[in-house]
Every structure is written in C-alpha cells, then in structure tokens.
Image (tube, grey):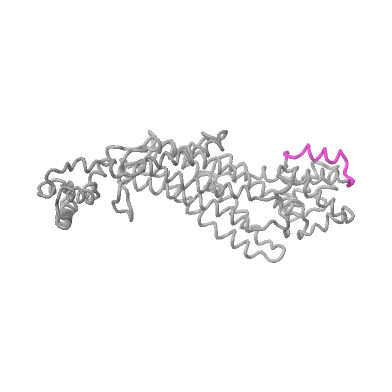
C-alpha cells in the first residue's frame, strides 16, 4: 500500500509543522523510551546493582537506531508494544538484554515519555504564540490611531481604532500564553514508581533500602533533564490523567482566542476593511473567479473548533480510571494528545501568517465609519446645541425625527447618510461647526494610548522572554 491508498491524518498532511510532527513521531517516542531505559540502567548501576559498563555502553550506542520492522514482528507475537521494543532493544544490545526495563512497568517509559513530549509540545506552542503576539503588536502599532467603526451586538457602535482591535486580539492570545506557560511550570515527571505506584519492585531490588529507591527516583528524573523537585509525589500506575485534560484545556483556551481573531478578520473582510494575505496565483473560488475568500481564517476557525471539542475526552478518561489504572485510557490518549497539538500547531502557524500579512484598506475603513458617524455623534451634537442656548428636549426630538428619516432613506433607497444636512437646516444648530463635531478622532477615547500600554506591558515582555525564538517560520503552503 502506497501513501495514497491508505488514510493519512489531514493534520499531518495539511496543517501541522514538521517540528510538531517530529515531536509526536514514533522515532521520537521510542528514542525517548530507550533513553529512559538507559537512564534507569545507569542509575541502578550507580546505586550498586550488578549492571556492567558494557551493558550500559551497548544501551547508549543504540538509542536512536531503531529497527521498527523487527519491533512490529515482536508485537505481532507478544501483543504488547512496550515489550516488543524491549526485545528489539535487546536484539541491538544483547549484553544488556537481561537488565533492560529492570524493575519497571510499561508506564515507566510510556508516562515519562509522554510528559516529555507534552513539555516539548507546550514549549513549541508557547514560542508560536509569542510570534503571533509579536506580529499583532507590530500591526497594532502601525494602526494605533486609525479610527474605525466599532460594533456591539454586530450593530454599529462607538468608534475604536484598527490598532486597538488588533491589540485586543493580541491581548487575548497573551492570556492563552499565560495558560500554556502555567501548564509548563506545573508539569511534573512521573519518575520511577513501579507497577501500582508503590515502588515495591525497586524496594525488592535494593533490599528494602528506602533511601536508595528515593535516590533512584531522583537520579532518573534528573538524567532525563527534569528537576528532581518537579516529580509527582505520588501516583498509581500512571501519572494522574487529569493532567492531560488540563493540558488540552490550555490548548482549547488558545484555540478560542485564535478563533475570535480569525472570526473578526472574516467579518471585517466582508466589510472590505481588512483582508488576510492573498498570494498572486491563489484561487478564491472554483466558480467565482473574482472571489478573495478568507480561507486561512476559515481554516483557523475549523481547526479551533476541533481542539475545543477534544477537551471532553481527556477529562472523561481521567474520571473513568479505576483504582490504580485501567487500559481504556490508552486508545483515546494515542489520538487526543498528538491530534490536539498537531491541530493547535497548524492554527498558530496560520495565525502568525495572517497577522504578519494583514491588509488594511483605510479609505474603506473611513467610508464605513462616515456612514454611521452622524448617528453615533448625535449625543455630542445635542450637547453642543444646548451649550448654544437650545432646549435639550426640543433638540432631542429634532435629532430623533431626522435620524429615523435618514436611516429609513439609507435602508429603503440605498442612499448616503444625509443626517448632517438635515440637522444643518434646523435653527437650533445654527452657529455649530458640524464637521468639527464629527471629527472621528474625538470619538476613539484612549484607544491609541491603550495600544501603547499593550505594547509596553504585554508585547515587550513576551518579546524579551522569547527573544531567541522570534520570527519562527510560518509559511502556509496548503
């Protein structure tokens, strides 16, 4: 069967980066298993077990040269993937065969490996989030003072600025980054805990020496690049499965923020104000050749919906683990953990790509604002008339009557907004500079200053924390 005759995940084919795919590859997974077996053997030798230098050397020499065909053959016979790789490793390192996996249960390699994969994946997600926040920061700075029509209930509302809106998207993503960083800081290593978490097998190996078992746990943790103080204090056979739910929930939070950004871009594209990047030969529609569809933002929204929907599975798995462990977690975790990361990885590449290439049409932004600004400015006009001696209630009624008529003309006839001309003919507005009252910069409040605060308080600290990971490649090819 060639690659076109069997199913392949669209996440791998169309969305996830090579870096994220490499993290969740079989090569990476089994290489970590072997590093764990090596670390265990080294630590057991250091603590006095009868393990030779030759055995450790052979294990070290064959960490990455994995014979996957041999492993498949062993698994067909043994019906156990971890034991299949124990035998495959033993084939490559025959002197070490008797001591591979000594005292361990399968979850020694599976759980500890997955915690390492979660950490690497979260680190990559954090770096890509930082790049997205950086890109939106640059965009927000460029358009910090460009007035734009605001919306509440998707109805015209008080103006904002294009930059303020982008700062809000970036701020949302920074909250997602905080969640990811918190999960990274909270993540613990399972360590060496034994078949049901009691460490009984290791206690037997070390003749009931509790201190040596504790030392073994610390040594293996440190050899795998994890601080010894960041171990789980207690586990069953597996690390607490609720951790998976918390990690996926953090990814879902990122997905919600990314989908909000992409949805807003889609809405503004319909208004003609903002567009995602569009390549020279890109086709928007197979039928309607003129179209420039926001397909990248639509893909962001679709993938985010998938990530958000995955959160139920790991939490349900955690809730339904019986006593020390049941195996019904395995099949779902093989799907949920890699797929959630592959999906959010593709999302963030798209977010960075769109944010770095956003196109603004200032004249359309201004035209859309001008169509609504007379209505939005009526309270200011009322105050101005009262300050010139008019009766507030009389002015309110005049504005109400003319506003309704102007709105009806716009809706029924598709005409321009003539509210200013109507009001200009009223006695109560004589002597008032209506054009000055309608200066859009008078309605944007502190939006430009809020952009500056976002850049100073959010973006710059992110840029400093991820300085060596800025400008990650985010080219979207499909």
Q: Is residue 477 visible?
A: no
Nearer the observer, 444 or 235? 444
Q: Which residue is drawn at 60% across and 45% down?
A: 121
Q: Can residue 294 be seen in this view?
A: yes
Q: Which residue is drawn at 58% across and 39% down?
A: 19
- Looking at the image, residue 273 sits to the left or right of residue 181; the answer is left
Q: Residue at x 81, y 41 (%)?
A: 93
- Looking at the image, residue 84 sits to the left or right of residue 285; the answer is right
Q: In this view, does 316 lie above or below 86?
A: below
- Looking at the image, residue 337 sits to the left or right of residue 410; the answer is right
Task: Give the image location of residue 100, x and y in percent.
Answer: 81, 47
Task: Give the image location of residue 413, x and y in percent.
Answer: 15, 51
Task: Give the image location of residue 116, x and y in percent.
Answer: 67, 46
* Residue 2 among those drawn in magenta: no
Q: In which quarter of the image is residue 445?
A: top left
Q: Quadrant of residue 362?
A: top left
Task: Give the image location of residue 378, x and y in percent.
Answer: 21, 50
Q: How many labels does the image show?
A: 0
Q: Residue at x 83, y 40 (%)?
A: 56
Highlighted range, magenta: 48-65
* Residue 57 among those drawn in magenta: yes
């Amino acid at each position: 069967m060639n690659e076109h005759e069997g199913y392949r995940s669209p996440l791998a084919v169309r969305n996830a980066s090579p870096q994220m795919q490499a993290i969740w590859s079989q090569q990476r997974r089994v290489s970590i298993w072997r590093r764990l077996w090596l670390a265990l053997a080294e630590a057991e030798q250091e603590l006095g077990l009868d393990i030779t230098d030759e055995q450790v050397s052979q294990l070290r020499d064959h960490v990455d040269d994995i014979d996957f065909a041999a492993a498949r053959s062993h698994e067909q016979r043994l019906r156990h993937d971890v034991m299949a790789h124990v035998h495959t490793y033993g084939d490559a390192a025959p002197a070490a065969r008797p001591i591979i996996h000594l005292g361990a249960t399968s979850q020694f390699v599976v759980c500890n490996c997955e915690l390492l994969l979660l950490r690497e994946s979260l680190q990559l997600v954090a770096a890509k989030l930082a790049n997205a926040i950086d890109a939106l920061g640059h965009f927000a700075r460029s358009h910090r003072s460009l007035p734009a029509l605001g919306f509440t209930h998707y109805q015209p509302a008080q103006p904002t600025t294009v930059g303020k809106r982008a700062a809000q998207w970036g701020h949302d993503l920074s909250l997602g980054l905080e969640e990811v960083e918190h999960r990274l800081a909270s993540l613990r290593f399972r360590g060496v805990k034994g078949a049901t978490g009691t460490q009984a097998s290791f206690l037997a190996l070390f003749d009931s020496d509790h201190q040596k078992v504790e030392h073994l746990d610390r040594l293996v943790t440190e050899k795998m690049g994890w601080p010894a103080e960041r171990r789980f204090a207690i586990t069953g056979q597996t690390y607490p499965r609720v951790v998976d739910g918390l990690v996926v929930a953090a990814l879902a939070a990122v997905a919600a923020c990314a989908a909000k950004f992409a949805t807003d871009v889609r809405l503004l594209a319909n208004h003609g104000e903002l567009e995602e990047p569009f390549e020279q030969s890109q086709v928007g529609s197979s039928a309607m050749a003129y179209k420039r569809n926001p397909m990248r933002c639509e893909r962001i929204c679709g993938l985010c919906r998938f990530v958000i929907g995955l959160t139920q599975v790991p939490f349900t798995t955690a809730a339904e683990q019986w006593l020390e462990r049941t195996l019904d977690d395995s099949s779902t975790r093989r799907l949920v953990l890699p797929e959630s990361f592959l999906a959010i990885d593709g999302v963030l590449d798209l977010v960075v790509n769109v944010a770095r290439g956003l196109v603004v049409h200032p004249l359309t932004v201004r035209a859309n604002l001008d169509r609504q600004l007379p209505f939005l400015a009526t309270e200011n006009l009322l105050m101005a008339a009262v300050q010139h001696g008019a009766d507030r209630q009389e002015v309110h009624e005049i504005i109400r009557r003319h506003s309704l008529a102007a709105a009806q003309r716009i809706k029924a006839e598709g005409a321009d907004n003539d509210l200013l001309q109507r009001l200009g003919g009223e006695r109560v507005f004589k002597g008032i500079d209506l054009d000055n009252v309608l200066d859009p910069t008078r309605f944007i409040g502190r939006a430009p200053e809020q952009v500056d605060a976002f850049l100073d308080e959010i973006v710059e600290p992110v840029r400093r924390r991820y300085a060596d990971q800025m400008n990650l490649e985010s080219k979207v090819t499909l």
